[in-house]
Each structure stands twice: as C-alpha cells, then as structure tokens.
Image (cartoon, helix red, strand yellow):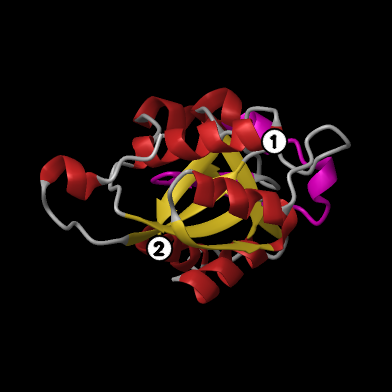
Amino acid sequence: MYCDVSLVTGQDVGMATYLGFLRAINLGATRKFPKAAIITAVEAAGFTDVETYINTGNVRFDTPLRSRARIEAALEEAFEAAAGFAVPTIVFTRRELRAIADEAASYDHGGKHYVSLLKDVPTAAAIAAVEAVGTTDEVARVGGRAVHLLLGDNYHEARLTNAVIEKHLGVATNRNLTVIRALAEKWC
C-alpha cells in the first residue's frame, strides 16, 4: 500500500499534489461511496491534505509518491476496502488538469462538452479509431489522456459516450466541462 519514499531512498522527496477521479461511483443503489468515506480511504492509504469536490468522485491529495501507477494502485486498494467494490481511479497532476481545461477553450462548440479522462495514454491507432466513430453532430478530440466529447444538447441521447471511449481507449471516467473548469480553478 503506502510507501514512505524517504525511508526507502534516504532522501526527503517532499510532497506533491495530485487529483484523483473515481470511475462509476454514486450510480444507483449499489455503488454508493460518499465524500466522507472517500476522504477517510485516501487518508488510510497514507495521503494527506485530502479534499473532495461534489459527490462524483473528485479528490485532491498530497503524497511523496511520484509514480502515477503506484498512486492509483494504492487508492484503488483503499477504495475497494472502504466501499466493498472495485473503484477504478485515474490520477492527474495539477499541471495536467490545467492543460486539459485550457485545451477545452480551443474547441468552439455550441452543444454539450464532456471530457473523458483516460487511465492510460492511447496509441495513435486507438485515437484514430475513436475519432472515426464521431459524426458531424458528435465529435471526439483526443489530447494526451483526455478525450473532449463535443456533443449535441442532450447528453443522454448521445451515441458517442464514455462507454464508446472505453471500448477503444481503455478505462475512462467522464466529467462535464463545467466540473473540469471548476476543478482547474479550485485546485490548479
């Protein structure tokens, strides 16, 4: 689980701030994971200065760890122990989230704008495949570990969904652009 890097390396590596995005929580009766329980689980994993934002699985924390994979694994283990079900978690630095929010400004779009946050960097072939799924009314634009979904006015009728993104690009969680911008303002 948590590893104090300074004990292993003998060096004081300091703390860094990361942002975690939990996938598929608080959907229906069986996947409830309240904000207070998320904070407790993150602290149990050894992270500090924990804060959440709205009840959709957005969490900010400090850690001396620098490996995104190790941070995600520690959080996923803690979340499963606390919630009783697997909670895929995607971690970004503050700089990465700020870049995603800034990139969104380059898309002139009159409809709904969502962002699917990816666990892994997609291959060029996978990017081409997911972008080819789009239509003139529904467009996917991939930048790093973020997919900007430019959709019509009704998200619930869209064919280009987070499930489609996951089919082509692997584990992803979806937030609307309003939440991405709010988090970038608050935490970056």
User: Residue 126 magenta-drawn?
Assistant: no
Q: Position of residue 81 (x, y in %)?
A: 61, 31
- The secondary element bearing badge 1 is classed as helix
Which residue type carries mark 2? Answer: Arg
What residue lies at 79% left-to-right and 41% top-to-bottom?
32
What residue lies at 70% left-to-right and 65% top-to-bottom?
110
Q: Is the C terminus in the top left, top right, bottom left or bottom right quadrant?
A: bottom left
Q: CA distance from mark 1 to mark 2?
A: 26 Å
Left or right: where 171 falls relative to 96: right
Which residue type carries mark 1? Answer: Ala
In front here: 14 or 88?
14
| Numbered disc total | 2
Residue pointed to by mark 2: 94
Residue 157 occupies which quadrant of the picture?
top right
| N-term-proximal mark, 1 vs 2 | 1
What residue lies at 40% left-to-right and 32% top-to-bottom?
122
Residue pointed to by mark 1: 83
Left or right: where 128 falls relative to 59: left
Range shown magenta: 139-165
Q: Residues within 10 Å of mark 2 (few under 14, many from 20)?
A: some
Q: Position of residue 146 (x, y in %)?
A: 48, 47
Judge whether 92 appears above or below 17 on screen: above
